[in-house]
């Protein structure tokens, strides 16, 4: 299972939200570059960049940071504000190794096929953010007209197999991942490679996800507040 340490950005600062609520912001010391350097020094291969400002504004706002992150030896997985094919192209040209898309595909899943053909299935990761059983879009501020299962079925039919699935109600709450959600999706889409996000707060959570066949896990708040020591879990949980 691949571990993705997350860095949430707003106005150039490292922050975290609780359940995607911009009125519940935690701000952390250290510049984005210093934070990323700590991930690299701990042995991380990837950084999961969440452009929260981009998600709120509807266009990416932190693309200029990508070259500096890659200079640290990190591969960059970028999302937030990628609401058009042009924004996806800008992220790729800025150096993102992968981009994950929620709102664009949640509103118009037919766009997924053209993006996969243009950029490749390894570079585009559909993001399905689930809140109260619905797929959340627009920075989790509204719901997609399609259910998460419908979106996954359409995108699987287009040739996608790897998905970022966030349990929104667990995000930033340190209550553990939604294992039942991932088990259900694995049963419905047995060929799917799911990256889990939301609520992962202890090494035991990661072990449970690994035992349940998750392809990857995104860790955020627990890294900043001491629940998980990145260097330790990278030794315990191996990459795919």
Image (spheres, rainbow, N blue to C red):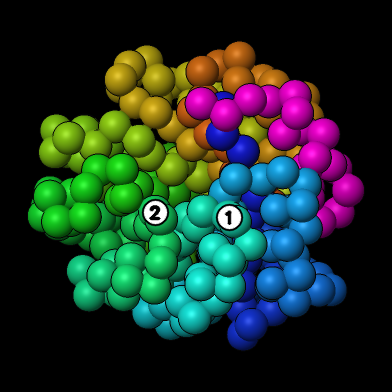
Q: Residue furthest right?
A: 226
Residue at 37% from the left image edge and 15% from the top image edge: 187
Position in image of residue 91 (x %, y %): 36, 70
CA separation, marks 1 and 2? 12 Å
Q: Which mark is residue 74?
A: 1
Closest to the camera, between mark 1 and mark 2, is 1
14 left or right, relative to 114: right
- The answer to whether any part of residue 209 appears in the image is no
Magenta span dominant secondary structure: helix
Task: Identify residue for label 2.
Answer: 98
Under circle 1, the secondary element is loop
Seen in the picture, residue 66 relative to 106 is either above or below; the reply is: below
Residue at 45% from the left image edge and 72% from the top image edge: 55
- The answer to whether any part of residue 101 appears in the image is yes
Residue 60 counted in the magenta span: no
Position in image of residue 163 (x %, y %): 38, 39
Under circle 2, the secondary element is strand
Position in image of residue 149 (x %, y %): 29, 34
Camera-side residue of 111 and 74: 74
Residue at 61% from the left image edge and 78% from the top image edge: 10
Position in image of residue 219 (x %, y %): 67, 45
Camera-side residue of 79 and 33: 33
- Range drawn in magenta: 221-240
How many labels were placed on the picture? 2
Chain-order first, disc 1 or disc 2: 1
Question: Which quadrant of the view contains residue 185?
Answer: top left
Residue at 62% from the left image edge and 85% from the top image edge: 11
């Amino acid at each position: 299972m691949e571990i993705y340490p997350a860095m949430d950005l707003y106005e150039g600062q490292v922050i975290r939200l609780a359940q995607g609520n911009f009125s519940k912001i935690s701000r952390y010391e250290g510049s984005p570059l210093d934070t990323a350097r700590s991930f690299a020094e701990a042995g991380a291969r990837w950084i999961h960049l969440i452009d929260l400002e981009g998600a709120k504004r509807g266009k990416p706002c932190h693309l200029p940071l990508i070259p500096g992150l890659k200079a640290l030896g990190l591969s960059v997985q970028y999302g937030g504000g990628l609401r058009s094919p042009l924004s996806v192209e800008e992220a790729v040209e800025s150096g993102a190794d992968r981009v994950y898309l929620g709102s664009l595909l949640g509103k118009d899943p037919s766009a997924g096929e053209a993006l996969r053909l243009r950029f490749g299935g390894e570079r585009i990761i559909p993001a399905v953010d689930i809140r109260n059983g619905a797929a959340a879009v627009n920075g989790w501020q509204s719901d997609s007209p399609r259910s998460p299962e419908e979106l996954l079925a359409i995108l699987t039919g287009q040739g996608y197999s790897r998905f970022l699935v966030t349990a929104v109600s667990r995000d930033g709450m340190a209550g553990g991942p939604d294992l039942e959600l991932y088990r259900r999706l694995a049963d419905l889409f047995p060929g799917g490679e799911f990256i889990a996000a939301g609520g992962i707060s202890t090494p035991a959570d990661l072990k449970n996800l690994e035992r349940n066949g998750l392809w990857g896990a995104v860790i955020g708040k627990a890294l900043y507040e001491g629940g998980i020591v990145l260097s330790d879990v990278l030794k315990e949980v191996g990459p795919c």
